[in-house]
Image: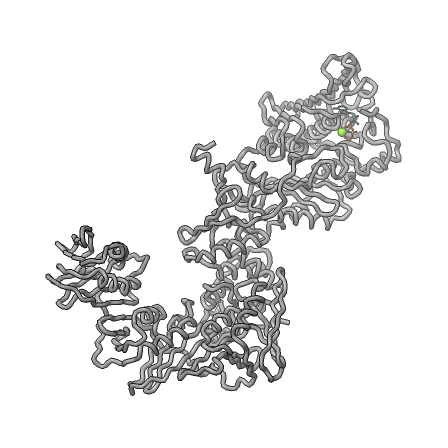
Amino acid sequence: MARIRILPDAVADQIAAGEVVERPASVVKELVENALDAGASDVLVELGGGGRTRIRVTDDGAGMDREDAVLAVDRHATSKIRQAADLIGVATYGFRGEALPAIASISHFTVETTPRGTPEDGTRLAVKGGRLEDVGSASRQPGTTVTVERLFFNTPARRKFLRAARTETRAAVEAVTVLALARLDVAFRLESDGRVLLDAPQAADIRERVRQLFGAEVADQLIEVHWRAGPLSVAGLVQRPADASPTGRRAYLFVNGRPFRDPFLIRAAEAGFRGAIAPGARPTVLLALALPGDQVDVNVHPAKLEVRFRDRFFVERTVEAAVRSALRPLAAAAVIGGGLGELGGQAARGADVSPGTAGTAVPLSFFAPEAGSPLVATAPRRPLLQVFDTFVLAETPDGVAIIDQHSAHERVLYERAMAELQRGDAPAQRLLLPLTVRLAPDELDAVDAHRTELARVGYAVEPFGGDAVILHTVPNPHPRFDAGRCFQELASDLARGRFGEAHTRLERFAATFACRAAVKAGDRLEPAELQELLERLFACNLPPHDVHGRPTIVQLPRAEIERRFRRG
Amino acid sequence: MKFTITREKLQEGLVAVAASVPTKTTLPVLSNILVEAVPDGIRLSGTDLDIAVSTLVPAEVDAEGAVTLPAKKLVEIVRELPSAAVRLTAASEQRVSLECGRSRFKLLGIPRDEFPSFPPVRFENAWTAASGDLQKLIGHVAFAASTEESRPILNGVLWELRKDQMRMVATNGHRLARMDVPASGGRQAADFIVPPKALEQIRRLFGAADEIQIAKSENHLGFRSGQTYVYTRLIEGPYPNYEQVIPRDNDRVAVVDKQALAATLRRVGVVASDQTHRVRLAFSGGTLKFTVSTPDLGEANDEMAASYDGEPLEIGFNANYLLEILKFMPTDDVRITMKAPERAATLEPSGWDDPASYLCLVMPLRLVD
Ligand SMILES: Nc1ncnc2c1ncn2[C@@H]1O[C@H](COP(=O)(O)OP(=O)(O)OP(=O)(O)O)[C@@H](O)[C@H]1O
Ligand SMILES: [Mg+2]
């Protein structure tokens, strides 16, 4: 590791300044980041009293010699950059030389450190309220232990703002969780008053990490994202729309291995779910962005919680597209029997995202490096079988797909209606005998208000006096279509605001139309119709999800079937 | 009940009736065939409640009576029997034994009381029609009926009986077929709206040379030829005024080769993505041009010769409707008449040497430029 130097004022002045330590969790974050920057492969965090009485972080990283250890607690002392230009694409979490002096000035602070290579050179250093109290020898394994006691002992006002120990502990766990998600190659462990709250050994991929941190149930609900557009690649996991709920979601963003907060980018990721998720449901997302260091400025927030993208619009668009593409393949469909890991992984792994692509030194590899098949949703192979006049069974490369005929057709018609609403070119069948439809007053109003949309999907409507309208042209999307009935149901839905929560007026209309125009559960379909339905479904943008966020496809993995039959 | 019958006669009767037995029903007795032994033979009947078929086949009856037997099993057994006398004996309504040569079967029946009784149709003052004429009408018209539930009237075929002709008309509101055949018999005028399913039975059951008697009760129609009867529920009218929508002033007329037109429509139709199969036809001079363009899929262009000397005209159609109609056109050339892109077009046989007259009509699709 490079030697520590004090940054010249001119450089120090260019670094985003402000409060580094707000609460115990900030201390945990800074210390763990330092451990990671020092190349640790094992990090232990110990808390006492929610971090108020004691925070100790132990690593097996590079350590420091005595001279560096003394320098480290000085302001603007860092080994990570030398000049302002180094800030561009900086690959370490730290770069300010601010964290240790800031922490040491408001606590009883002790460092014990031994550099790799010279194990006899251990140093122990104690600072109280910013004053160096003692420097001496210590004997320990190579690596560093930083102990922070009596945080805020000399700033009573700040101490008063601390929350209950439980809350502070939770925040500290979250700080470690975020870094554990960023660094799968490192083992993390957090103990609070002797209890293990987090224990995450090295993980092979992000799904395994999620399983360690959040449990198997959460991990099994996630589908993989692999996407690249120009210089930007996006990898990660997002929740299957049908599993998302309005509460309890988790959202994590990383750029070049660095966690950051960005509600707008989360919004963009959510936009990728449009037309495939229940209104109000918030999906869990974990996304790692990789792009060249000069495209993102990490030096904008005093606690390094935010970053600034050079082309923000492009990043948002790409994130949205990345999420959308992840929802497309068959692997994104719900699975019976769990154990999705293998299935989802094999079916939808892109070769795109590798840690080195953007030239960062912070290792970030969400997925094992071996490449898989590209992101395509292939239509299942025959044979097809209709059961209960409602579901279609088909063989897929990995198992059996169970398809809900109504939801699937709804998805097909929804995407087509959206396109037709925008282009206005739906085929409209002129009628020999115009249809007269009687409507309730609120339905008449709704029809009036949606005249343009109705015309665009094929209904040319004209008032007929009184409570009736007359249809001169109708859509004809499939042979079972009943134009008159569909129109009546559509008018009633529009009047009653069904699907009222959908995103835009067009989406709402398209969803209503699709729902009413689609084949119903209970319709017995001919083999040719089943085949055609599946082909159309798999030609859609988001085959596995219906317009309301329910699945259109449920997969029964071959492995699950084999397991049940105790085969292999 | 006890009777002896040849395997062939039994088979013949079962085949006639079995097609009227529903494959799926919530009323178990409807899966059965009613077997009645009467003095001059046995009467076999089946129904799905909408349509009933009944036929009498000669048999030697020793004891009269009636049972119902599972249609599917009975048909399968009789099909596999050797060509010999079949003897059927019912010890009670539920226990029936069937013997043929050395084969013996015991079948469980359902009491005949549970079998629905037939509508009381009286054939005293019946209309009559030649079966060949009826078959022709049905074969050219019934396809055009609607299957939409919201307009039940269009689910039926309109059948008009007049003094010197019979006509059938069917439409789903998008396309229409109409055929007239001259018919002697000075009958009383009558209009019926008949489910196509019933017409299909009539086409199947009666030979082309048969004379068919037709009689009506309250809301049923009965057909009879020889000892075979078909009964059907009628659809309540009135049928829409179709005359009014058949164009009379279509002044643009093309005559085209049917095979070539169908082949070209099928070819360009490959690129039509959805069920609507929109194809754009451009008539101009001696050519007919075809364009199909589907967003996200592609485009197809084609052309063929056509005799046409009207003003150039572009018009859009559902290719499936055209193809379907062409299938029923009896001549090599078809005559197409049009007025404007939003008005109905007609298709007729060209140079048809037949006393009947046939017309199909198809409504265009809206074209967007
Ligand atoms: N756990 C550790 N192992 C080895 N060296 C460390 C460790 N913690 C700190 N250091 C050294 O001390 C220096 C100062 O650390 P400090 O956290 O104050 O600043 P920084 O990490 O360089 O920047 P920032 O303020 O952005 O975190 C680091 O540059 C590093 O050289
Ligand atoms: Mg640091």
Q: Position of residue B67 (x, y in %)?
A: 18, 59
Q: Is residue B297 above or below residue A286?
A: below
Q: Position of residue A369 (x, y in %)?
A: 66, 35
Could you tell me if residue A162 is visible in this image? no
Q: Which residue: 76% across, 17% down? A: A114
Q: Which residue: 68% across, 41% down? A: A352
Could you tell me if residue B341 is visible in this image? yes
Name the outermost residue toward the left. B62
Image side of residue B167 versus residue A218, left or right: left
Closer to the camera, A521 or B269? B269
Rendering colour mode:
one colour
Q: Position of residue B87 (x, y in %)?
A: 16, 57
* Quadrant assignment, res A287: top right
Q: Is residue B295 above or below residue B157?
A: above
Q: Is residue A525 above or below residue A118?
A: below
Q: How many marks?
A: 0
* Quadrant assignment, res A233: top right
Location of the N terminus of chain A (image quadrant):
top right
Name the outermost residue toward the front. B83
Q: Position of residue A539 (x, y in %)?
A: 57, 54
Q: Which residue: 45% across, 83% down? A: B244
Image side of residue A209 versus residue B112, left or right: right
Image side of residue B251 versus residue A297, left or right: left
Closer to the camera, A386 or B353? B353
* Quadrant assignment, res B121: bottom left
Instruction: Indicate which quadrant contains ligand 1.
Output: top right
Closer to the camera, B5 or B56? B5
